[in-house]
Amino acid sequence: MYLERMEGHLMLTIHDELAQVFAIGELNRLDRLRACAKANEKGLGQADIAMRLGVSQPEIHRMLRKIKNFPSLLRETPRVVILQFHAERISHAQMMETLRQWPFTFGEDAEPSNPESVLTRGSWDEITDAFHRDLIDVDDYEELCKVVTSAAE
């Protein structure tokens, strides 16, 4: 995060403030999905979960359907790690240490024999997306590129 000095105080830049608000919102959404899934696994009914999360029962139904169709939403990903940093849940050093050790995957053609096939995304795509959204800076991106390149050699 970048800090600017204003009236003798260090403050987040507007870009970092926006990134922080975005990160907190996204992590809250993921936390809600995870809590909903866990409560459902423990046998709580949808109405009870809805009351405790402060949402409607149909919203819980939609959340559980989303989890069933996209179970990967519950996993930690490079994107989640980066969001945790911006939400100040982890430090920059913790973020980078986690990302340096990440077993990155890379996009590839869904059907290699079909030149018009869809490209499947890999976890490295989350790093490039974060870089383009200014969620990681050029120094972090270059460091991660070096780690990935040296691991491939």
Image (spheres, rainbow, N blue to C red):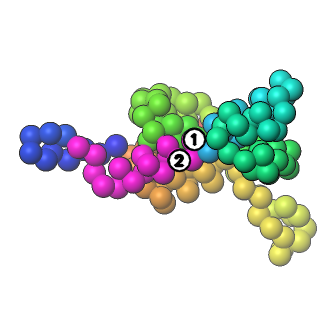
Q: Main secondary structure of the magenta part?
A: helix
**Can you say which quadrant of the picture contains the C terminus?**
top right
Q: Amino acid at mark 1?
A: Asn
Mark 1 closeness class: few <14, some 14–19, many ≥20 residues within 10 Å: few
| 11 with respect to 1 (left or right) | left
- Looking at the rendered structure, which numbered label has been put on residue 47? none
Q: Residues within 10 Å of mark 2 (few under 14, many from 20)?
A: some
* Residue 114: x %, y % from top left: 89, 71
Query: Magenta segment: does it hold 46?
Result: no
**Residue pictured at 73% horizontal, 40% vertical:** 50
Question: Could you say where residue 107 lies in the image, as x and y percent from the top left?
Answer: 72, 56
The numbered disc on residue 28 is 1
- Whether residue 140 sits left or right of residue 63 in the image: it is left
Q: Which residue was labeled with disc 2?
A: 25
Looking at the rendered structure, the secondary structure element under dot 2 is helix
Q: Nearer the viewer, residue 85 or 50?
A: 50
Q: Where's residue 129, x and y in %?
A: 55, 57
Q: Amino acid at mark 2?
A: Gly
Q: Nearer the viewer, residue 147 or 6?
A: 6
Q: Is residue 13 magenta?
A: yes
Query: Between 61 and 78, which is closer to the camera in this rendering?
Result: 61
Spatial CA span between label 2 and label 1: 5 Å
Magenta span: 11-27
Whether residue 147 appears in this view of the structure is no
